[in-house]
Amino acid sequence: MSKTIEEINEKIKSGKVVVLNAEEIIDYAAEHGVKKTAKEVDVVTTATFGPMCSSGAFLNFGHSDPPIRMTKVWLNDVPAYTGVAAVDVYIGASELSETEGMKYGGAHVIEDLISRKPIKLRATSYGTDCYPRKEIETYITIDTINQAYLFNPRNAYQNYNVATNSSNRTIYTYMGKLLPHFGNANFSTSGQLSPLINDPYYRTIGIGTRIFLASTEGYVSWYGTQHNPTVERTAKGVPIGAAGTLAVIGNLKEMSTDYLRACTFHRYGVSIFIGIGIPIPVIDEEMVEFLRVKNEDIYTEIIDYSVQRRNKPSYGKVNYAELRSGKIKINGKSVQTAPMSSYYKALEISNVLKNRIKGGKFSLTKFAAPIPLDEKLRNLDILSKEEL
Amino acid sequence: MIKKKLVLSFPEKIVTKPITYKLVKEYNLEFNILRAEITPNMEGKMLIELKGDKSQVDEAVKYLTQAGVTVQEAAKDIIIDKNLCIDCGACTSICITQALTLDKKTHKLKFDKEKCILCELCLDCCPVSAIKVNI
């Protein structure tokens, strides 16, 4: 018994669609069995709300009079990349303010744009015959400019490692503050709710898939940078540690700060919490087997972030049920754990998306091209031209 | 006579030594342990109120520092700004007394003021700066 996307979309239109979130499907499948679940449930909503540094937005300001071909641009003193056309820029989430340092960055500019706050735009140029102006200082809001779209090269990691610290000093990382002598251990991803964990071989999520992106309808635009699907997997296909990633795109003008938040990791830098929800069509029984994945089935590795090398020592594997219990054992020692991503928010997103689908406001898409399963992660080695 | 509220951090190695006992014996101080989290082989934390002669209190603080204890003045209050908090729980693993936890049912951040020893370890670990101190 299998279902097509078209059949599911018909059910969405007629209001007869059955949608569960990725947490609810676990008990439902246990109670009703795989066969019945595949028949009765049409869509499962997955979600995540975590810090995703590899994010940013393209903006087009429109032309001033006389016009300028911007060569350096600052938004609230945060530099934006402008090596594209005259008034196009890319504001990266992790870019730091030149006046406030880590307190304010590209992520805060993006959040302030969504909040419709005025942003100071400053730009310089060498001046050309067609673009004579050499500098400009003005104020914009998201509504005074042309396009503004979030375009994130790497979001929604399929799984991620656990960070701990064996050294004798506190370290500050993108996985948060790590206390000395295994004082704590931090993990990321929403586990059983996480989109790519629920579709581990990308059977339904692909390039062109419509998603919930910080409240608006966005799309998977490509597979993400550092996409690494060839890592070790459990018998049920769940990758152990960081694996697949997604590049996503969506209209910034329609986003909400409820699901996109700037953040600062003390002594590390600026990042951005992004809320992503992905609906997974229950196309067949095999899909139910993947969707019923629970925290106990998802394993990841405990990594020592105090070793300042590419390859860091591992202290073994642990599952998300253990991680979410608040305590794990590392080398026999009891260590407190904390998530870096908000399960509360992820669950909220999965329910918002569920209600939109049930209400006929969000329909499913068949992807335009699949996400590759054979990519491998490459390292950057320091080589001469001859050694390449 | 002065009164001082201090947060004492005991490194693993000296957690089991009878350091606080000396405060009474050598420095003639009255002390009140308001909250404590002491486990062998783990860093210990204690919120303590000292009462005594100013010079004796100062001497006692010197003694504690020399013994390897980190001494800091206690803040009045830790405040979680619910409007800013996104319930990620990043602060929960560094909270040694587990005053900050994630509710198992609602997945929301819970702050139990009774358990807080005002050590301020959580202050710089909130990614959205929702944890503030009231001095």
Image (cartoon, coloured by chain):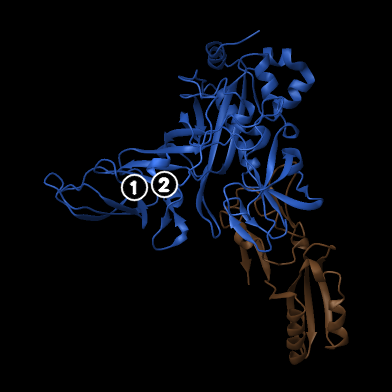
Chain colours: A blue, B brown
Q: Nearer the viewer, residue B65 or A204?
A: B65
Q: Tell me what residue is drawn at x 70 percent, y 73 percent.
A: B74
**Where residue A99 sits in the image (x, y, percent)?**
39, 63
Tell which circle, 2 or 1, labels the residue nearer the N-terminal end: 1
Say which element carries label 1. loop
Q: Report whether B48 appears left or right of A68.
A: right
Say which element carries label 2. strand
Q: Report whether A177 appears left or right of A320.
A: left
Total labels: the figure holds 2
Q: Nearer the viewer, residue B57 or B80?
A: B57
Q: Tell me what residue is drawn at x 77 percent, y 44 percent.
A: A325
Q: Report whether A226 appears left or right of A350.
A: left
**Residue B65 seen in render:** yes
Q: Which residue is mark 2?
A: A92
Q: Which residue is mark 1?
A: A81
Q: Nearer the viewer, residue A311 or A122?
A: A311
Crowd rating for badge 2 (residues with CA inside 10 Å; few <14, some 14–19, many 20+): many
Quarter of image, res B77: bottom right
**Where residue A98 sits in the image (x, y, percent)?**
39, 60
Q: Is residue A313 above or below residue A348?
A: below
**Residue A324 seen in render:** no
For disc 1, the chain is: A
View extreme (top): residue: A1
Quarter of the image that includes the N terminus of chain B: bottom right
Q: Is residue A44 above or below residue A302?
A: above
Q: Is residue A24 above or below residue A6?
A: below
Crowd rating for badge 1 (residues with CA inside 10 Å; few <14, some 14–19, many 20+): some
Mark 2 near mark 1, Cβ–Cβ under 8 Å?
A: yes
Amino acid, disc 2: Gly
Amino acid, disc 1: Tyr
